[in-house]
Structures are given as structure tokens and as C-alpha cells.
Amino acid sequence: MQNALSVDVEDWFQVGAFETVISRGDWDSLECRAERNTDAVMALFDDAGVKATFFTLGWVAERYPALMRRIVDNGHEIASHGYAHDRVFNFTPDQFAADIDRARKLIEDTSGAMVTGYRAPSFSIDARTPWAHEILAEKGYSYSSSVAPVKHDHYGWAQAPRFAFHPVKGSNFLEIPVTTAQLGPKRLAAGGGGFFRLLPYQFSRWAIRQVNKQDQRPAIIYFHPWEIDPDQPRVANAPIKSKLRHYTKLDKMTGKLTRLAKDFDWERLDVIAARELGRLA
């Protein structure tokens, strides 16, 4: 069973955990580490023979066009993460349409590749934004991986399907949620990010095996380039909970990712999406 490994390309100061203490206007004055960290991720993938999908902010593409070309030249899929990590439920439909248009143009112009996939910042497509999938379909996207089908204090759509589904009637457009595992009646977040970094590796391995063997479906796993960077600047005035989530076990992440990359078979998300589309046909 091939699974999908994906990278949300954003810098350490652009995460939702710090949005109340780091002003958008200060971003250009801060130390940018997204390029070097993304290159390090690609080197790790190259060593393991992994091809993946890089959901990239338009803000990053605008400043690091050569990085966008390197992602594509290395055989990875490049996709959209919106322009500046704004949550979808904070947009009006028109604002959302403008945001994804802006990001897509920047990513396509800098990478030279077509963008057909989208991931909402902080998995912010949920029950409040049924129009978001409709707009993505109208704009010609093939798939979104923007739903976390769990209950969480920052995001989540607990009632959403666990696996790929058609969110727009009459359209082949797919939503491919990030992975969850099932423990009895309880649905557990197991799609990567902080859950992968903070919990024992054995949990993620168990969850992926459950999805592959019991559900006969591919796992959809994600992480961020800043998660392999233990030397990144510290935000002293951030809430304690945010700091614990963001900084804990950064030094363990590269080793865990290396193990993950070698323990399972990985493919780009656009390839997985095409297979899921055929399964749903």
C-alpha cells in the first residue's frame, strides 16, 4: 500500500500558534529559515527515495522562487497552502477565491508547474465553510487535503468522513482528509504534525498499519519544515501551551522522519488522489 507524505511549507513565525504574538507586518524583519529547512527535508527524502507533495505558501514562493523550482526538479508535487496562512473560516467566499488565486499564480509562475492541489492553513475547511470546496472545484483544482476529521481545540471537523470523498455534488473534485485511527468508538488524530512529533513513533506506525491493513486505504501524513529545526528562534512571549506544542522534541524529528520514510512506501498526493478518484468512480 502506497501512502502520501506531504509537507506544509511555512516558516516558524507563520504558524497559527504564534499569530497573536507575532505581527504579520513583522514577518519580513524576522529570520527566514523555510528555504534551508525545506532543502533539508528534500535531502532526507532523496536519501530514502521518497516523492512527496509540498503545500507551499504563496508568501514563501514570492520570496524563494528558486526553492519552488528545486521542489519540482526533484520530482515532488508542488501545491497551494494559500498565500499567508490565513484560516479559511476567517475569509468571505470572495476573499478566499482571491487568496487562492494569488497563491496559485505565484507558485505556478515560480515553479513552472501546474498547481492542482490545495491544503487549507490549520485544516480550516470545516462545517462552517461548505462554499470553500465549491470554489476550489470551480477554480479547477483536482483535490484538497484540508479536513482533519477530529475534534481539536484549534481545528477539526469531527463529522467529516475519514477517507476521500466528493464534497461537491456533480463534481469529481476530491477532499482527502489527513489520517485518523480508530480505537474502539474513539477517532484519534494520527495524520502527522505535532501528533507525530510528540507521541511515540510506535503510535504512528500502528495507525498507518491500521489504515493500510484494516481499512485498505492509504494514509495521508503531513509535517512542516520548521519541525526539523531545533535551532530556530524562540518566541518568549508566546503562551506556554503554544510553546510546548511548538518546541517539544524538535531535536527528535529528523530521526523519526527518516524511520517513517523507510518503514512505509510513499507517493505524491496527486498520484494518490487519482487512485482514490478511480476507487470512488
Image (cartoon, rainbow, N blue to C red):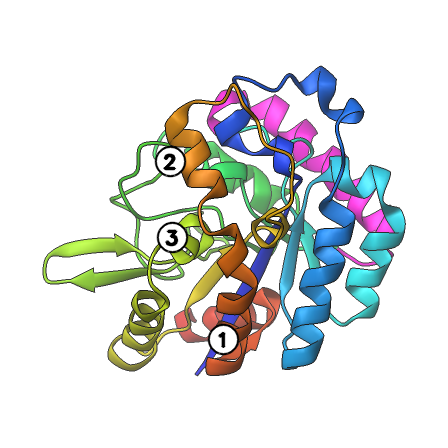
* Residue at x-position 45% and y-position 63%: 220
Q: Residue 139 appears at what percent x and percent y?
A: 66, 43
Residue where numbered disc 1 is placed: 259
Split into 4 quadrants, where in the image is the N terminus?
Answer: bottom left
Toward the left, the furthest residue is 184
Marks 3 and 2 in Cβ contact (< 8 Å): no
Mark 3 and mark 1: Cα distance apart in space = 15 Å
How many labels were placed on the picture? 3
The amino acid on which the numbered mark 3 sits, given as a three-letter code, is Leu
* Residue at x-position 15% and y-position 54%: 186
Foreground of the two, 140 or 120:
120
Say few, some or many: other residues with alpha carbon within 10 Å of mark 2 (under 14 / 14 to 19 / 20 or more): some
Quadrant in which residue 15 is drawn: top right
Q: Vertically, is 259 above or below 174? A: below
Q: Which of marks 3 and 2 is nearer the N terminus?
A: 2
Residue 159 lies within the magenta run: no
Magenta segment, prevailing SS (helix, strand or loop): helix
Whether residue 12 is visible, yes or no, is yes
Residue where numbered disc 2 is placed: 155
Q: Is disc 2 placed on a helix, strand or loop?
A: loop
Foreground of the two, 110 or 195:
195
Residue 32 placement, left or right of 52? right
Report the span colored magenta.
89-114
Mark 3 and mark 2: Cα distance apart in space = 18 Å
Foreground of the two, 31 or 6:
31
